[in-house]
Amino acid sequence: MDDFTKLFQRYSVNLDITHRCPLECVCCQRYSSFTSKGLKVPGEDLSIDNYAKVIKYFKHINFCGQVSDPVHHPKFIPFLEMAYENGNSVSIHHASAAKPEKWYKKAFEANTKARWTFGIDGLPEESNMYRINQDGEKLFRVMQTARPILEQKPVWQYIVFSYNENNIEEAVRMAKEIDVKFMLLYSSRWRGSNDPLKPKNEKLSLNLYVGGN
């Protein structure tokens, strides 16, 4: 069996479908390699035709940008609709919060089976201390809006930083209150041992996933 045949026997694929994102997260490659140096982020929007080829061969589509946020692809809602109609399972990782709130409702309704993960690192009002330009309070409202529409519970992804390491219990309480999953993550992208964003408490649990199915 050749490598090409093996590739298309894979169950899932991760797609970075655009080059757009309004956030300036300092540990993100988008910022560290491009925007902080005044460089244009390379890339282009994935075409409808090429996307159609992808969903033909892969059962699961993961929209998780490495230098972008997938919702900023101009055809993202049609992409969700196409996956739904084709029977593909879909997961989306989103943090920018820059779309109008009415847009999100359309996106959720376009594919109610999709699994959405929202990156809110800390309590909603403090998450922009890392995710520069993010409106965390708006994204929290969007996550609430998603809950009754989507068939799978939305996931609140919370990366631990020095500014939010003491607010984890409060965040877990808030997640339970709106009936979404809570996922705690620990980063390794520190800019040296004295990085001010690095959490101080080394005894925190290495992982936390709350919320059931």
Image (spheres, helix red, strand yellow):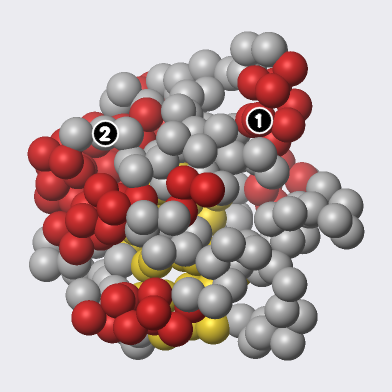
- Residue identifier under label 1: 31
Expressed as whole percent of the image width and height from the top left, the position of residue 87 reads 28, 54
Expressed as whole percent of the image width and height from the top left, the position of residue 46 reads 46, 24
Quadrant of res 182? bottom left
Q: Amino acid at mark 2?
A: Lys
Query: How much space separates mark 2 and mark 1, taking CA atoms?
Result: 20 Å
Expressed as whole percent of the image width and height from the top left, the position of residue 101 reads 16, 41
Quadrant of res 39? top right
**Which of 30/166 is in front?**
166
Quadrant of res 149? bottom left
Q: Is residue 195 above or below residue 213?
A: above
Q: Amino acid at mark 1?
A: Tyr
* In this picture, residue 61 sits left or right of residue 153: right
Q: Secondary structure at mark 1?
A: helix
Q: Residue sitting at 76 percent across and 80 percent down?
A: 202
Q: Residue sitting at 61 percent across and 81 percent down?
A: 207
**Which of 5/112 is in front?**
112
Badge number at residue 99: 2
